[in-house]
């Protein structure tokens, strides 16, 4: 009898030890994920102590999952290993995606698992083992070995106890991950989170849970009653327009030639030829001189500065910072703000069958007799571009393999000079009809280290405020920036000599990732923003991080339209209005209902139609935003009843 009581006491003490050991490994696993994400031991410890709620929830989640696995297998080392492998893999992949692309791993990236081989081929050459990642993996291996020996000392000796443990921990796990139970504890539903901000606030694992939970809620929401209301309004407006057109002796304008001379088009009635439109998204282009504390012996972008003073220019508000190029492309092309999509979705990760029904600039240009060509100077692996632009109805979709074999390469990619020459070649090959050419450069893609350019170019840039690593990034970025400026000059010089009308739009997709560490970057070090932690930034600060530059140049206007700031959401609309095009139903609705009230909406940022900046969407804009969201979600997730 005493022996049975002793065995029971031993079993209970073993269970208590197992509980505590696995709790400890849960805490250690949280530390390892933050060590990998932040690439700094002090930063990892600071994050844990400054985010206690997220740290406790994450550690508890790891603990409960480990207990569930222990209930199945009865081995602590297996429990830790099976829990740690996906968590550490998630952290490492997200870190490398941020380092390479400036944008962390997001929920919708998991849809690209079929393209894993192609993506790995693209990313692997740029992946370098870091000391924190190596140290974290070694620590994880050491913990596994220690737990292997601990299993010989502590173990559950009777099956019923393990079954109870399994049942309880499994129930808690299901509650955590299959029902969105912790959503209110991890996300403010009134706030638009980016995944970068989620990771800053919650850590990488809890950030993915939060994104999943919001996505789960989105997918289970009821049909929006606004859809029928807006659909009725649109039908009535279209009927009124059709009636007005049929009773009018004057046809509505279909081109700039029918618009007369005004400040929108700058063209006269005599000019009947439609202009070719060259839309250039230049990788990470922005006016570097906006950063103070950096000394330049000469102007890095003289052509851009000269042209900006002669034609329409201003700030371009991107939907992303330091990465996510494909999503900027598609927001410009569709006028759909990423902020109104379901959580976990981006414009580049929707179901393939959705893209054919999205409203696009391409469809409007096609309706006016244009030939549509998409050009990207790299491979098609990322962002599903080949499928998307085919569904958009582009006549040609061209990538790096369309360039000559001996095309110049700079910074590891096809150079911006070769890119400009390709644009000129396509223009000359398509002289029989007006051309809409949407082109994306890539020479100045990150990372901006000394390995980027084969031959080191010293532009003489110095700074007393930048750290050594950040200054190196700025110096290398500036080389590619100068090349992009030269390609712009090359193009405008060529098109200025052409008799046929041409409109050229040139803009940067996002700010470059000028960073030398998790909490060090050129924007913080120069005082452009007050903190390197995005969670501390105001709406005005966020707007600075989302602002690049753009210009609209033509070879036919007698005077340029006034300067204005625009955004990824509205640039395409601005272009089509300037050309005097009759807009399709969606773009007309966007112009009448959204553009007057909203320029951009992003995480912790709202800029209204008059340029006023807010940290969050103001209450007086809720009605507009609800209607805009209903329209977009009807197109993407619904039955496309409004404009279908």
Image (cartoon, rainbow, N blue to C red):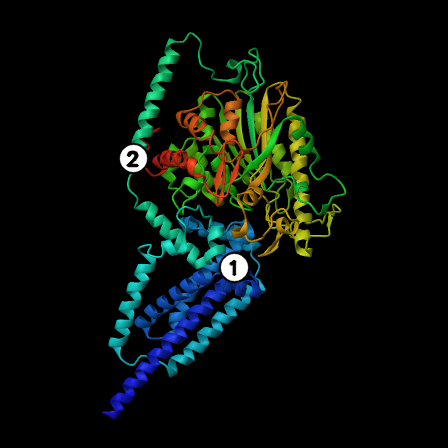
Counting residues from the start of the chain, the first of labels 2 and 1 encountered is: 1
User: Which residue is outermost to the top?
Assistant: 249
Q: Image quadrant for the C terminus?
A: top left
Whole-percent x, y for residue 39 in the image: 56, 61
Please indicate whether residue 617 sits to the left or right of residue 353 in the image: right
Q: Image quadrant for the N terminus?
A: bottom left
Is the Cβ of the residue at disc 2 closer than 8 Å to that at disc 1? no
Whole-percent x, y for residue 643 in the image: 35, 28
Whole-percent x, y for residue 423 in the image: 59, 31
The part of the image, by quadrant, that contains residue 273 is top right
User: Which residue is outermost to the left?
Assistant: 1
The part of the image, by quadrant, that contains residue 25 is bottom left
Q: Is residue 347 visible?
A: no
Name the residue: 68% across, 35% down: 486
Q: How many marks?
A: 2
In terms of depth relative to the viewer, which is nearer, 280 or 641?
641
Residue 613 against residue 239 in the figure, above or below: below
Report helix, strand or loop for mark 1. helix
Residues packed near mark 1 inside 10 Å, few (<14), some (14 to 19) or many (20 plus):
many
In terms of depth relative to the viewer, which is nearer, 616 or 46?
616
User: What distance separates the C-alpha of mark 2 from that of mark 1?
Assistant: 42 Å
Q: Which labelled disc corresponds to residue 445?
A: none
Please indicate whether residue 70 sits to the left or right of residue 290 in the image: left
Residues packed near mark 2 inside 10 Å, few (<14), some (14 to 19) or many (20 plus):
few
Q: Which labelled disc corresponds to residue 225?
A: 2
Q: Nearer the viewer, mark 2 or mark 1?
A: 2
- Residue, disc 1: 37
Residue 537 against residue 34 in the figure, above or below: above
Report helix, strand or loop for mark 2. loop
Whole-percent x, y for residue 56 in the image: 42, 64
Q: Is residue 477 visible?
A: yes
């Amino acid at each position: 009898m005493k022996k049975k009581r002793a065995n029971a006491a031993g079993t209970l003490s073993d269970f208590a030890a197992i509980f505590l050991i696995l709790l400890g490994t849960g805490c250690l696993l949280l530390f390892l994920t933050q060590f990998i994400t932040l690439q700094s031991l002090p930063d990892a410890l600071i994050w844990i102590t400054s985010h206690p709620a997220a740290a406790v929830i994450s550690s508890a989640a790891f603990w409960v999952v480990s207990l569930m696995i222990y209930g199945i297998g009865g081995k602590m080392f297996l429990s830790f290993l099976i829990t740690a492998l996906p968590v550490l893999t998630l952290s490492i992949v997200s870190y490398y995606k941020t380092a390479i692309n400036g944008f962390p791993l997001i929920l919708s990236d998991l849809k690209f698992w079929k393209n894993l081989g192609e993506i790995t081929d693209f990313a692997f050459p740029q992946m370098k083992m870091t000391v924190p990642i190596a140290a974290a993996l070694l620590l994880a291996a050491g913990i596994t070995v220690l737990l292997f020996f601990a299993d010989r000392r502590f173990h559950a000796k009777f099956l019923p106890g393990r079954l109870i443990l399994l049942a309880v921990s499994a129930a808690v796990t299901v509650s955590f991950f299959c029902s969105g139970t912790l959503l209110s504890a991890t996300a403010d539903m009134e706030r638009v989170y980016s995944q970068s901000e989620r990771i800053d606030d919650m850590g990488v694992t809890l950030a993915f849970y939060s994104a999943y939970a919001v996505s789960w809620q989105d997918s289970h929401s009821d049909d929006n009653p606004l859809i029928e209301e807006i659909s009725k309004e649109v039908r009535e407006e279209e009927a009124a327009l059709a009636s007005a057109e049929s009773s009018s002796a004057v046809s509505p304008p279909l081109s700039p030639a029918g618009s007369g001379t005004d400040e929108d088009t700058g063209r006269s009635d005599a000019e009947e030829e439609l202009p070719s439109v060259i839309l250039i998204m230049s990788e990470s282009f922005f006016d570097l001189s906006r950063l103070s504390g950096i000394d330049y012996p000469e102007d890095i972008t003289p052509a851009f500065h000269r042209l900006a003073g002669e034609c329409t220019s201003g700030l371009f508000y991107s939907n992303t910072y330091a990465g996510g190029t494909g999503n900027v492309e598609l927001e410009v092309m569709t006028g759909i703000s990423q902020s109104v999509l379901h959580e976990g979705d981006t414009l580049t990760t929707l179901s393939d069958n959705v893209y054919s029904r999205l409203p696009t600039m391409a469809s409007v240009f096609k309706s006016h007799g244009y030939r549509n060509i998409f050009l990207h100077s790299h491979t098609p692996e990322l962002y599903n571009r080949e499928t998307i632009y085919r569904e958009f109805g582009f006549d040609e979709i061209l990538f790096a393999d369309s360039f000559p074999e001996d095309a110049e390469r700079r910074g590891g990619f096809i150079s911006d000079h070769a890119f400009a020459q390709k644009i000129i070649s396509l223009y000359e090959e398509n002289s029989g009809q007006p051309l809409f050419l949407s082109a994306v450069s890539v020479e100045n893609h990150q990372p901006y280290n000394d390995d980027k350019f084969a031959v080191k170019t010293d532009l003489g840039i110095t700074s007393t405020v930048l750290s050594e690593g950040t200054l190196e990034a700025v110096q290398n970025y500036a080389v590619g920036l100068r090349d992009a400026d030269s390609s712009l000059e090359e193009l405008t010089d060529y098109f200025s000599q052409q008799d046929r009308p041409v409109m050229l739009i040139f803009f940067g997709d996002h700010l470059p990732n000028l960073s030398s560490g998790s909490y060090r970057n050129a924007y913080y070090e120069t005082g452009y923003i007050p903190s390197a932690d995005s969670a501390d930034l105001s709406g005005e600060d966020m707007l600075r991080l989302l602002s690049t530059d753009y210009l609209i140049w033509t070879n036919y206007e007698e005077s340029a339209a006034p300067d204005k700031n625009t955004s990824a959401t509205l640039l395409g609309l601005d272009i089509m209005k300037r050309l005097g095009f009759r807009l399709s139903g969606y773009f007309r609705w966007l112009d009448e209902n959204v553009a007057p009230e909203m320029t951009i909406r992003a995480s912790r940022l709202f800029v209204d139609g008059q340029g006023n900046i807010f940290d969050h969407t103001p209450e007086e804009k809720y009605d507009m935003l609800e209607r805009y969201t209903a329209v977009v979600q009807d197109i993407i997730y619904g039955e496309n009843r409004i404009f279908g």
